[in-house]
Image (cartoon, rainbow, N blue to C red):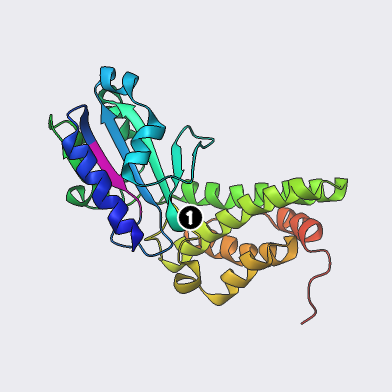
């Protein structure tokens, strides 16, 4: 795969450049799950002078010919290499290394992530992170997760009624993501918690996959309603009958006949 060549090249460049004081790889390849459709993803921590002098376009071009370089909405440089392979590069300074400790999880073994750590500052920060993100555990956390699903569903219904169908699609995408989280929690299938759609077709029941693929108010509500009630029952909570009746009328006014 071209990704392996890109990863080897990034590693070599980082190790040869003394201005790169630390670097890490994250994502699918760090976790051992990379395939021909996966990105290559890196953080580079440079000394401040080196970062000030760095030209991201020139640096990425040293990895491989770049078809397109852009900064995404999060400020990350994204390079499109041959075969439309994406490379994500965060060019930071050594002062940003502690911020890695604010990540919800690292998602891979420390040794698989560290590319260089010249000053020994990066590995301890990574080691202090959990491998997997903490899951909703308390009754309140579970209720909040389910409540956020309902919140996005209600918003989608109201903007649909107003005729804002594109805004409704955006809200439904958020609702679908929360439904996937609810299903993963209910099914004890939480390995891909941070990106709940990843491998969902293989890891979640067909009914959940069909509901999310349909992406409509009724489909998402019928599956989400069942997940909501089942999860809350585990924690000894139930939504009020009045609330459920109102949501049923708003989100699925014509349910299928038994």
Vertical arrangement, residue 168 with respect to residue 75, above or below:
below
**Residue found at x 49% / y 67%:** 200
As for residue 26 lying within the magenta part, the answer is: yes
Residue 224 in view here:
yes
As for residue 245 lying within the magenta part, the answer is: no
Q: Nearer the viewer, residue 13 or 210?
A: 13
**Residue found at x 37% / y 64%:** 35
Residue that lies at the very extreme toward the bottom in this rendered image = 258
Residue 101 in percent (x, y) is at 29, 34
Magenta segment, which residues?
A: 23-27
Image quarter of residue 92: top left
**Residue found at x 13% / y 32%:** 118
Residue 107 in percent (x, y) is at 31, 51
**Residue found at x 41% / y 66%:** 189
Residue 29 in view here:
no
Image quarter of residue 89: top left
Vertical arrangement, residue 83 with respect to residue 22, above or below:
below
Residue 176 in percent (x, y) is at 61, 57
Residue 38 in percent (x, y) is at 41, 58
Q: Residues within 10 Å of mark 1 (few under 14, many from 20)?
A: few
Q: Which residue is mark 1?
A: 84
Q: Nearer the viewer, residue 196 or 77?
A: 77
Q: Magenta region, mostly helix, strand or loop?
A: strand
């Amino acid at each position: 795969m071209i990704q392996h060549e890109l990863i080897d090249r990034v590693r070599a460049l980082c190790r040869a450049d003394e201005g790169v004081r630390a670097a890490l790889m994250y994502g699918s390849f760090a976790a051992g799950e990379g395939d021909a459709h996966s990105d290559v993803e890196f953080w580079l921590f440079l000394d401040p002078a080196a970062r000030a002098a760095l030209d991201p376009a020139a640096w990425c071009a040293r990895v491989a010919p770049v078809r397109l370089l852009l900064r995404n909405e999060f400020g990350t440089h994204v390079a499109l290499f041959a075969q439309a392979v994406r490379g994500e590069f965060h060019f930071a300074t050594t002062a940003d290394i502690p911020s890695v400790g604010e990540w919800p999880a690292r998602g891979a073994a420390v040794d698989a992530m560290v590319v260089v750590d010249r000053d020994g500052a990066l590995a301890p920060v990574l080691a202090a992170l959990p491998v997997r993100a903490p899951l909703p555990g308390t009754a309140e956390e579970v209720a909040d997760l389910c409540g956020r699903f309902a919140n996005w569903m209600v918003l989608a219904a109201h903007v649909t009624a107003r005729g804002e169908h594109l805004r409704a699609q955006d809200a439904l995408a958020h609702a679908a993501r929360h439904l996937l989280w609810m299903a993963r929690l209910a099914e004890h299938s939480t390995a891909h918690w941070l990106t709940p759609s990843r491998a969902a077709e293989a890891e979640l029941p067909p009914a959940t996959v069909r509901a999310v693929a349909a992406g409509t108010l009724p489909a998402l509500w019928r599956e989400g309603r069942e997940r909501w009630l089942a999860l809350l029952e585990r924690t000894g909570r139930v939504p009020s009958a009045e609330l459920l009746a109102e949501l049923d009328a708003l989100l699925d006014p014509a349910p299928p006949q038994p």
